Image (cartoon, rainbow, N blue to C red):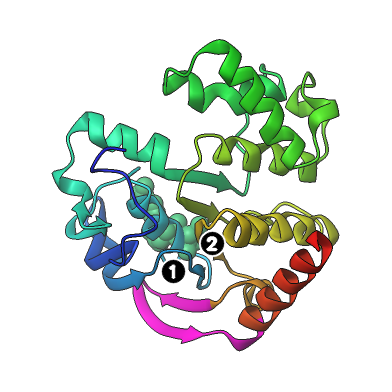
Protein backbone atom coordinates (compact mmCIF):
# COMPACT_ATOMS: atom_id res chain seq x y z
CA UNK A 1 0.00 0.00 0.00
CA UNK A 2 1.45 3.38 -0.93
CA UNK A 3 1.75 6.21 1.56
CA UNK A 4 -1.03 8.09 -0.20
CA UNK A 5 -3.58 5.40 0.62
CA UNK A 6 -5.95 5.94 3.50
CA UNK A 7 -5.36 3.35 6.13
CA UNK A 8 -8.29 2.57 8.42
CA UNK A 9 -5.86 1.82 11.26
CA UNK A 10 -4.64 5.39 11.18
CA UNK A 11 -6.22 7.40 13.97
CA UNK A 12 -5.92 10.75 12.19
CA UNK A 13 -9.26 12.08 10.96
CA UNK A 14 -10.12 10.60 7.56
CA UNK A 15 -10.80 14.10 6.28
CA UNK A 16 -9.88 17.49 7.59
CA UNK A 17 -11.19 20.45 5.60
CA UNK A 18 -9.53 23.63 6.81
CA UNK A 19 -11.02 27.03 6.11
CA UNK A 20 -12.25 25.79 2.75
CA UNK A 21 -13.36 28.43 0.27
CA UNK A 22 -14.57 28.03 -3.28
CA UNK A 23 -15.55 31.27 -4.93
CA UNK A 24 -16.90 31.65 -8.45
CA UNK A 25 -16.64 34.88 -10.36
CA UNK A 26 -19.68 35.54 -12.57
CA UNK A 27 -18.98 38.79 -14.38
CA UNK A 28 -19.10 41.46 -11.70
CA UNK A 29 -20.37 39.24 -8.91
CA UNK A 30 -18.45 36.91 -6.69
CA UNK A 31 -20.34 33.83 -5.55
CA UNK A 32 -19.04 32.43 -2.30
CA UNK A 33 -20.24 28.86 -2.87
CA UNK A 34 -18.04 27.61 -0.02
CA UNK A 35 -17.05 30.24 2.47
CA UNK A 36 -14.66 29.16 5.22
CA UNK A 37 -15.74 25.61 6.04
CA UNK A 38 -13.69 23.76 8.64
CA UNK A 39 -14.66 20.17 9.25
CA UNK A 40 -13.18 16.89 10.49
CA UNK A 41 -14.62 13.52 9.59
CA UNK A 42 -13.37 10.38 11.34
CA UNK A 43 -12.62 7.09 9.65
CA UNK A 44 -15.77 4.96 9.53
CA UNK A 45 -18.17 7.82 10.20
CA UNK A 46 -21.43 8.22 8.26
CA UNK A 47 -22.03 11.94 7.89
CA UNK A 48 -24.88 13.75 6.19
CA UNK A 49 -24.26 17.16 4.68
CA UNK A 50 -27.53 19.08 4.79
CA UNK A 51 -28.66 22.44 3.50
CA UNK A 52 -31.07 24.02 1.07
CA UNK A 53 -30.42 24.17 -2.65
CA UNK A 54 -27.46 26.42 -3.43
CA UNK A 55 -25.99 26.21 0.09
CA UNK A 56 -22.71 24.76 -1.20
CA UNK A 57 -23.14 21.04 -0.46
CA UNK A 58 -22.04 19.74 -3.86
CA UNK A 59 -19.18 22.22 -3.98
CA UNK A 60 -17.84 20.92 -0.64
CA UNK A 61 -18.21 17.31 -1.78
CA UNK A 62 -16.39 17.98 -5.06
CA UNK A 63 -13.50 19.59 -3.19
CA UNK A 64 -13.21 16.55 -0.92
CA UNK A 65 -13.39 14.30 -3.99
CA UNK A 66 -10.48 16.14 -5.57
CA UNK A 67 -12.67 16.98 -8.56
CA UNK A 68 -12.25 20.69 -7.90
CA UNK A 69 -9.63 22.86 -6.21
CA UNK A 70 -10.37 25.32 -3.40
CA UNK A 71 -9.95 29.05 -3.93
CA UNK A 72 -8.27 28.98 -0.52
CA UNK A 73 -8.01 26.60 2.40
CA UNK A 74 -7.16 22.93 2.18
CA UNK A 75 -8.47 19.40 2.21
CA UNK A 76 -6.30 16.99 4.18
CA UNK A 77 -7.04 13.30 3.72
CA UNK A 78 -5.27 11.21 6.33
CA UNK A 79 -2.53 13.77 6.66
CA UNK A 80 -2.06 14.25 2.92
CA UNK A 81 -2.95 17.69 1.60
CA UNK A 82 -4.73 17.14 -1.72
CA UNK A 83 -3.15 20.35 -3.05
CA UNK A 84 0.31 18.84 -2.51
CA UNK A 85 -0.37 15.67 -4.48
CA UNK A 86 1.11 15.29 -7.94
CA UNK A 87 -1.28 14.81 -10.85
CA UNK A 88 -0.69 11.06 -10.71
CA UNK A 89 -1.25 10.91 -6.96
CA UNK A 90 -4.45 12.92 -7.27
CA UNK A 91 -5.69 10.64 -10.05
CA UNK A 92 -4.86 7.66 -7.87
CA UNK A 93 -6.69 9.25 -4.93
CA UNK A 94 -9.81 9.75 -7.06
CA UNK A 95 -9.61 6.26 -8.47
CA UNK A 96 -8.57 4.23 -5.43
CA UNK A 97 -9.57 6.09 -2.31
CA UNK A 98 -12.83 7.73 -3.35
CA UNK A 99 -16.02 6.16 -4.67
CA UNK A 100 -18.71 8.56 -5.81
CA UNK A 101 -22.41 8.33 -6.59
CA UNK A 102 -24.62 11.08 -7.94
CA UNK A 103 -28.30 11.92 -8.13
CA UNK A 104 -28.32 11.24 -11.89
CA UNK A 105 -26.42 7.90 -11.63
CA UNK A 106 -23.90 8.94 -14.35
CA UNK A 107 -23.69 5.53 -15.99
CA UNK A 108 -22.40 5.39 -19.56
CA UNK A 109 -25.42 4.66 -21.76
CA UNK A 110 -23.59 2.75 -24.49
CA UNK A 111 -21.99 0.30 -22.05
CA UNK A 112 -23.47 -2.71 -20.30
CA UNK A 113 -23.66 -2.73 -16.51
CA UNK A 114 -20.63 -5.01 -16.31
CA UNK A 115 -18.64 -2.64 -18.53
CA UNK A 116 -19.72 0.38 -16.49
CA UNK A 117 -18.77 -1.30 -13.25
CA UNK A 118 -15.38 -2.44 -14.44
CA UNK A 119 -14.43 0.90 -15.98
CA UNK A 120 -12.62 2.24 -12.88
CA UNK A 121 -10.56 -0.96 -12.83
CA UNK A 122 -9.60 -0.47 -16.45
CA UNK A 123 -8.23 2.92 -15.53
CA UNK A 124 -6.45 1.25 -12.63
CA UNK A 125 -4.98 -1.25 -15.14
CA UNK A 126 -6.39 -4.33 -13.50
CA UNK A 127 -6.14 -7.29 -15.87
CA UNK A 128 -9.20 -8.42 -17.79
CA UNK A 129 -10.02 -11.68 -16.06
CA UNK A 130 -9.77 -10.14 -12.63
CA UNK A 131 -11.94 -7.22 -13.78
CA UNK A 132 -14.64 -9.59 -15.00
CA UNK A 133 -14.81 -11.53 -11.77
CA UNK A 134 -14.74 -8.43 -9.54
CA UNK A 135 -17.44 -6.72 -11.64
CA UNK A 136 -19.59 -9.83 -11.33
CA UNK A 137 -19.03 -9.92 -7.58
CA UNK A 138 -19.85 -6.21 -7.15
CA UNK A 139 -23.03 -6.56 -9.20
CA UNK A 140 -24.01 -9.61 -7.16
CA UNK A 141 -23.51 -7.60 -3.99
CA UNK A 142 -26.14 -5.10 -5.15
CA UNK A 143 -28.44 -7.85 -6.49
CA UNK A 144 -27.86 -7.19 -10.19
CA UNK A 145 -25.90 -10.23 -11.33
CA UNK A 146 -28.70 -11.25 -13.71
CA UNK A 147 -28.64 -7.84 -15.37
CA UNK A 148 -24.92 -7.53 -16.02
CA UNK A 149 -25.24 -7.57 -19.81
CA UNK A 150 -28.06 -5.02 -19.87
CA UNK A 151 -27.61 -1.37 -20.69
CA UNK A 152 -28.61 1.35 -18.21
CA UNK A 153 -31.67 2.38 -20.28
CA UNK A 154 -33.14 -1.10 -19.74
CA UNK A 155 -33.14 -0.65 -15.97
CA UNK A 156 -35.23 1.22 -13.43
CA UNK A 157 -33.78 4.23 -11.60
CA UNK A 158 -33.18 2.19 -8.46
CA UNK A 159 -31.36 -0.49 -10.43
CA UNK A 160 -29.21 2.13 -12.13
CA UNK A 161 -28.26 3.59 -8.77
CA UNK A 162 -27.43 0.10 -7.49
CA UNK A 163 -25.14 -0.34 -10.50
CA UNK A 164 -23.58 3.07 -9.76
CA UNK A 165 -22.96 1.87 -6.18
CA UNK A 166 -21.30 -1.28 -7.52
CA UNK A 167 -19.08 0.89 -9.71
CA UNK A 168 -18.24 3.15 -6.76
CA UNK A 169 -17.27 0.07 -4.76
CA UNK A 170 -15.16 -1.71 -7.30
CA UNK A 171 -11.70 -0.42 -6.35
CA UNK A 172 -12.49 -0.89 -2.64
CA UNK A 173 -12.32 2.81 -1.77
CA UNK A 174 -12.25 3.87 1.87
CA UNK A 175 -14.40 6.90 1.23
CA UNK A 176 -17.88 6.95 -0.30
CA UNK A 177 -19.11 10.38 -1.38
CA UNK A 178 -22.78 10.47 -2.34
CA UNK A 179 -24.43 13.57 -3.79
CA UNK A 180 -28.22 13.33 -3.36
CA UNK A 181 -28.10 9.58 -4.14
CA UNK A 182 -31.85 9.16 -3.70
CA UNK A 183 -32.87 12.46 -5.29
CA UNK A 184 -34.31 10.81 -8.41
CA UNK A 185 -35.86 7.81 -6.68
CA UNK A 186 -39.20 7.09 -5.05
CA UNK A 187 -39.06 6.67 -1.28
CA UNK A 188 -39.18 2.85 -1.30
CA UNK A 189 -36.30 2.61 -3.78
CA UNK A 190 -34.47 5.38 -1.96
CA UNK A 191 -34.66 3.35 1.26
CA UNK A 192 -33.24 0.33 -0.54
CA UNK A 193 -30.27 2.40 -1.74
CA UNK A 194 -29.75 3.92 1.70
CA UNK A 195 -29.74 0.47 3.31
CA UNK A 196 -26.96 -0.52 0.91
CA UNK A 197 -24.99 2.60 1.72
CA UNK A 198 -25.33 1.78 5.41
CA UNK A 199 -24.19 -1.78 4.74
CA UNK A 200 -21.06 -0.46 2.98
CA UNK A 201 -20.41 1.78 5.96
CA UNK A 202 -20.94 -0.98 8.55
CA UNK A 203 -19.69 -4.10 6.82
CA UNK A 204 -16.95 -2.69 4.62
CA UNK A 205 -15.96 0.08 7.03
CA UNK A 206 -16.28 2.83 4.43
CA UNK A 207 -16.40 6.42 5.61
CA UNK A 208 -19.55 7.96 4.09
CA UNK A 209 -20.35 11.59 3.36
CA UNK A 210 -23.81 11.95 1.91
CA UNK A 211 -25.21 15.20 0.60
CA UNK A 212 -28.96 15.58 0.89
CA UNK A 213 -31.59 18.21 1.42
CA UNK A 214 -33.93 15.63 2.96
CA UNK A 215 -33.56 15.96 6.68
CA UNK A 216 -35.73 12.94 7.52
CA UNK A 217 -33.54 10.67 5.39
CA UNK A 218 -30.36 12.00 6.98
CA UNK A 219 -31.85 11.49 10.45
CA UNK A 220 -32.67 7.86 9.74
CA UNK A 221 -29.24 6.92 8.45
CA UNK A 222 -26.41 9.27 9.36
CA UNK A 223 -24.51 9.24 12.63
CA UNK A 224 -23.81 12.94 12.36
CA UNK A 225 -25.56 15.87 10.69
CA UNK A 226 -23.67 18.84 9.30
CA UNK A 227 -25.63 21.87 8.13
CA UNK A 228 -24.54 24.37 5.49
CA UNK A 229 -26.12 27.72 4.66
CA UNK A 230 -24.69 30.22 2.19
CA UNK A 231 -21.44 28.29 1.98
CA UNK A 232 -20.92 28.33 5.74
CA UNK A 233 -21.08 25.56 8.29
CA UNK A 234 -23.98 26.48 10.58
CA UNK A 235 -24.50 23.26 12.52
CA UNK A 236 -22.73 20.04 13.41
CA UNK A 237 -24.48 17.53 15.64
CA UNK A 238 -24.43 13.89 16.60
CA UNK A 239 -27.59 12.09 15.47
CA UNK A 240 -28.98 9.70 18.08
CA UNK A 241 -31.65 8.19 15.80
CA UNK A 242 -29.12 7.38 13.05
CA UNK A 243 -26.75 5.83 15.59
CA UNK A 244 -29.57 3.74 17.13
CA UNK A 245 -30.75 2.58 13.69
CA UNK A 246 -27.20 1.64 12.72
CA UNK A 247 -26.78 -0.41 15.90
CA UNK A 248 -30.13 -2.14 15.31
CA UNK A 249 -29.24 -3.03 11.72
CA UNK A 250 -25.86 -4.27 12.89
CA UNK A 251 -27.44 -6.49 15.54
CA UNK A 252 -29.85 -7.85 12.92
CA UNK A 253 -26.98 -8.60 10.53
CA UNK A 254 -25.01 -10.34 13.30
CA UNK A 255 -28.07 -12.32 14.31
CA UNK A 256 -28.49 -13.55 10.76
CA UNK A 257 -24.91 -14.70 10.71
CA UNK A 258 -25.25 -16.82 13.89
P1 LIG B 1 -25.93 22.74 -3.43
O1 LIG B 1 -25.28 21.47 -3.83
O2 LIG B 1 -26.05 22.91 -1.95
O3 LIG B 1 -27.26 22.94 -4.10
P2 LIG B 1 -23.80 24.03 -4.94
O4 LIG B 1 -22.55 23.66 -4.26
O5 LIG B 1 -24.13 23.30 -6.19
O6 LIG B 1 -25.02 23.96 -3.90
O7 LIG B 1 -23.77 25.58 -5.30
C1 LIG B 1 -23.47 26.59 -4.35
C2 LIG B 1 -23.53 27.95 -5.03
O8 LIG B 1 -22.46 28.05 -5.97
C3 LIG B 1 -24.81 28.21 -5.81
O9 LIG B 1 -25.12 29.56 -5.69
C4 LIG B 1 -24.41 27.87 -7.23
O10 LIG B 1 -25.18 28.58 -8.16
C5 LIG B 1 -22.95 28.29 -7.27
N1 LIG B 1 -22.15 27.49 -8.22
C6 LIG B 1 -21.93 26.17 -8.15
N2 LIG B 1 -21.13 25.78 -9.16
C7 LIG B 1 -20.85 26.89 -9.88
C8 LIG B 1 -20.08 27.16 -11.06
N3 LIG B 1 -19.42 26.17 -11.69
N4 LIG B 1 -20.03 28.43 -11.51
C9 LIG B 1 -20.67 29.43 -10.88
N5 LIG B 1 -21.43 29.24 -9.77
C10 LIG B 1 -21.52 28.00 -9.27
MG1 LIG C 1 -25.96 19.95 -5.10
Where is the N terminus found, in terms of image quarters? top left
Between 47 and 71, which is closer to the camera in this rendering?
A: 47
Residue 18 image point, x, y percent: 22, 68
The label shown at residue 55 is 1
Residue drawn 50% across and 13% down? 127
- Element at label 1: loop
Secondary structure that dominates the magenta span: strand
Residue matched to label 2: 210
Question: Which residues are drawn in magenta?
Answer: 224-241
Residue 146 image point, x, y percent: 85, 27
Nearer the observer: mark 2 or 1; the answer is 2
Q: Is residue 94 left or right of residue 116?
A: left
Where is the C terminus found, in terms of image quarters? bottom right
Q: Is residue 233 magenta?
A: yes
- Element at label 2: strand
Q: Is residue 214 magenta?
A: no
**Mark earlier in primary sequence (2, 1):** 1
Q: Residue 108, can we see it?
A: no
Query: Residue 199 sits in which quadrant?
Result: bottom right
Amino acid sequence: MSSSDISPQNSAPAIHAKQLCRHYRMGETLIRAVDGVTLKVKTGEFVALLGSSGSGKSSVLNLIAGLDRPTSGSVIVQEHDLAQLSREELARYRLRTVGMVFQSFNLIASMTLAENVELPMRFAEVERRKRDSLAREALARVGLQARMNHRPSELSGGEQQRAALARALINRPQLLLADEPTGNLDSHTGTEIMNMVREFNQQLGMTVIMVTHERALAERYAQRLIFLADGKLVGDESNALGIANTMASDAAANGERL
